[in-house]
Amino acid sequence: MNTSSPTLAWLQDPEVFEVNRLPAHSDHTWYGAQRICTRTLDGSWRFAYTSSIDERSRNFWHEDADLSTFGTIQVPAHIELEGYGQIQYVNTQYPWDGVSSLRPPAIDTDRCAVGCYVRNFELDSAWEDMRVCISFQGVERAFFLWVNGCFVGYAEDSFTPSDFDLTDYLHPGINRLAVEVFQHSSASWLEDQDMFRFFGIFRPVVLYAKPRLHVEDIWLRAELDTDNITGILDPRITISSADDAETLASCIVRLRVTDANGTKLYEGAPGFTTVEQANSPWEDARTVELDCPLRLENIVPWSHEQPALYTVEVALVDFHSGCEVERATVRTGFRRVGIEDGVLRLNGQRLFFCGVNRHEWSAEHGRAIAHDDMIRAMETFKRNNINAVRTCHYPDQTPWYDLCDENGVYMIDEANLETHGSWQKLGAVDPAWNVPGSLAAWTPAVIDRARSMFERDKNHPAVLMWSCGNESYAGDAILAMSRFFHETDPSRPVHYEGVFQARGREGYDPAWEETSDVESRMYATPADIRHYLENSPKKPFILCEYMHDMGNSLGGMESYMRLGEEFEQYQGGFIWDYMDQALWRRDALGRRSLGYGGDFGERPSDYAFSGDGIVFADGTEKPAMQEVRYWYADASTRAAHDAACDAAEAESARAIAAQAATRRERAAEAPDLVIAQGDVNLGVTCGELSILFSWAEHGPVSLRVNGREWLWRAPRPALWRASTDNDRGCGFPARSAAWLAAEAFCRCTDQRVEELGPRRVVVAYRFAADVVPGAEIVLRYTVEAGTGMLVEALYTGVGGLPELPCFGVHLVTPAPVADVAWTGLSGETYPDRWRGGTFGRHHEEPHVPAYLVPQDCGCHVRTHELELSARDAGGHCWGKIAFVMEEEPFAFSALPASALELESAAHPEELPVTERTHLCLYGAMRGVGGIDSWGSDVEKPYRIDAAGTYRVAVRILG
């Protein structure tokens, strides 16, 4: 749309999404006649904020406007993170739900904030004979642009560039840019992604100049022949000229192709033919194609394993002078992607996505991320065998695509579209007023979003599939997006998940099945996927989202990965998601902490649902990452890992058995136990180990090794673990809350000395709780001369009780443990998440991982030995205590907080600062799950039936 008269009516008109914006184009670089052609406008801008449209500065865009009341703001940045407005996180609901009564395309003008930006710049004298344009790489949500008091244009679509030609508005010397950014427009209905909601200029702003001959757009159309060694290059190039049409028509186009080493594969001026394009967006431009595509021999195909890149240079030469006017550069790779016999293949080989969804995020700057953030993310990808990324749910910044090209990371490039709140409410599907649906008024806008993404990203070999957006239900508008991709770029398949949601519902049109070339679903169970794959499907299957990593999660990944070994049409998936969305803040007590939804005073909010990454918000890896690294490795690497762990575990078991045999042999020579019987206590000493059993406290109240105390109070049964996000999501804590009460208020029903002699003392304490009638727990302590003390916890259940979270024995130290060393699997492991652990000797300081909401953590399964160390204030070790498995490996956690303390804290900072360490030795532990965080339970093998019998036995050595 072209006009010189702006109106606020555009904000609520879905058919107006750009005014005077230049056509979208490739992200190639160029230079002309040794002149730098780009200049950043990032930095400090003058700024004014108002909370509603009516309050905004009306004439700030005038060339001589008084800006004395304006402050400053950084660009790029979110307005909210610069100290203005309200930070808000919501998931599927629209941010105004319950605050403003709206339906598409309306906005609440009284609650639509406005940011007015002004920036002066001096026009480079070297540019005075060139066409000068500006590119806004990302502006949320809608904006108007003026230069020197003249209206230039308007644009929406927050996540793709909006370029404007400024040539006619500039003059030598100082020029003034004015940008008016609106928090909401009709586009807000199309951008309901699961994320913090911001607005403002949050990506770079670039001023650029075009030489008199300029490459406006390049589409290399680089493909790989079926022989896998011949590259086919068939570029389509659009050229513009500031001179007359004859100069444009006579322009010579030269090509140069080199590999990564600079070796020349082609150089020359091949024959080009002008292409007549109906409805071309380019005015007074010439589009050319090769008369015959170039065939380049001995090409290295681009892939994850070998991401070979080639540089293509396009030189524009003036016919009359013979001088080169401009040189444009694009990197590409030669590869072939498509669906063959129902299987998605790259270069003829089956594709398997070991992927992750990735929001752009920084705990300091939100989505206004820097290049260093991208490099750090890519390093994490490579370290953990992640080979694919879905740009959820918008196109990312261009440098990320460059990094994916360089590192062989496969991309599903997703259009900026999500309308979740328009069709799903409280989990129920209700598309009564879904947009874009099949509404003609919204179709051009979503096609424009598809086109803007395609044009910018089309040359990146990493982009294997186009995606029509996310969770926007289905309809003719999204089908039209897919048809645009298919018609414009037949070389790439198209992805979309939402049609699955519409099947079998009123209004469903079977034609919508054309939207996606793959069967894409999110959070399908392994059984659901198996059912699909066993019924001769036409399309390959992709999990566009799976393994919802909210808090302590990612259990059961094995069930998904095994499907890939069994079914060729199962092509992997993308974990949700890469990074916790949380922001650094000062809490009410002035502490610097990570805040999630609701922590900023916003309502409505979806609270901690923003925290579901495989890395924390500061970029450090979550404990579950070792499971990702294991399962995303190739089969041979996993097999080698398993073999090494099995061998190490077997060797450890043999060594422990040999040590136990030696202890038994030497026990005959050990002195008798020293026993002191009192009225309230029973004291037993075994070498350097001394125990004081209390009848008043119903357990041992003292456990000393070499005179150092290791018990704060008598041990108790461990019957509750702090609820994980997945537990809460499936209702487990409510179903099994009786065990929380049992953990807190179990009572001793019997205590007795079962054996008392100079060589052996056995003391047993029985526990029960009225809330779990019939369940019985015995904590038995056996002290034997020369062999230390055996701690045994035995659970005997009955039917009719809710599932157990865990079972074991809970000991508390009187002083904090400085170091925990164990022989077993590395890292944090659970019954449904342990394959990534490496068997060996490991150590750590007791800590609670930085989950946004404290929850159960720190479990270590398949443990053989455990040693706790304490240090004095000077850092010197003053004591150690060792625990060794008796017959079977055990699980343990050693944390500075109890399960009940973890349960009651909403943030890590709310956990008490304590002198103690809580050691739990487990004989049964519930899995953490990961199918989703809002309904799916832990897989059945990893639940704990309260009718069962469970035991843990660990020997404490003096």
Image: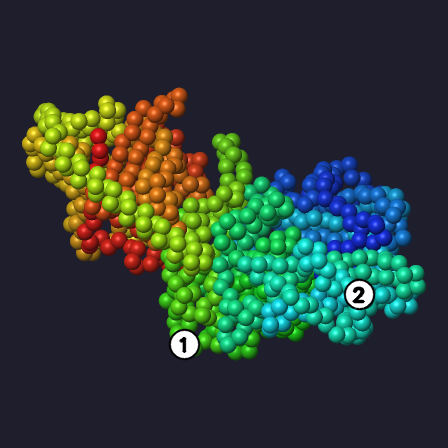
Above or below residue 871? Residue 903 is below
Q: Earlier in the sequence, mark 1 or mark 2?
A: 2
Residue at the top extreme, as displayed = 874
Q: Residue 559 location, x and y as percent? A: 37, 61
Q: Residue at x 63, y 72 (%)?
A: 225
Q: Residue 380 location, x and y as percent? A: 52, 48
Crowding at mark 2 (Cα within 10 Å: few <14, some 14-19, many 20+): few
Secondary structure category for the residue under label 2? strand
| Residue 393 visible to the viewer | no
Kindly identify the amino acid type of the residue bearing the numbered disc 1: Asn
Residue 168 shown left or right of residue 219 in the figure: right
User: 443 or 231: which is nearer to us?
Assistant: 231
Q: Residue at x 40, y 21 (%)?
A: 874
Q: Residue at x 50, y 32 (%)?
A: 591
Residue tagged 1:
535
User: 684 or 813: which is nearer to us?
Assistant: 684
Residue 897 shown left or right of residue 798 in the figure: right
- Screen quadrant of the C terminus: top left
Crowding at mark 1 (Cα within 10 Å: few <14, some 14-19, many 20+): few
Q: Residue 784 location, x and y as percent? A: 13, 34
Q: Residue 801 location, x and y as percent? A: 22, 53
Residue 169 shown left or right of residue 178 in the figure: right
Given contact means CB atoms under 8 Å apart, are the residues at marks 1 and 2 in contact?
A: no
Residue tagged 2:
268
- Screen quadrant of the N terminus: bottom right
Residue 42 shown left or right of residue 102 in the figure: right
Q: Residue at x 24, y 24 (%)?
A: 706
How far is mark 1 from mark 2, CA to CA?
A: 53 Å
- Quadrant of residue 636 in the image? bottom left
Disc 1 versus disc 2: nearer the observer: 2
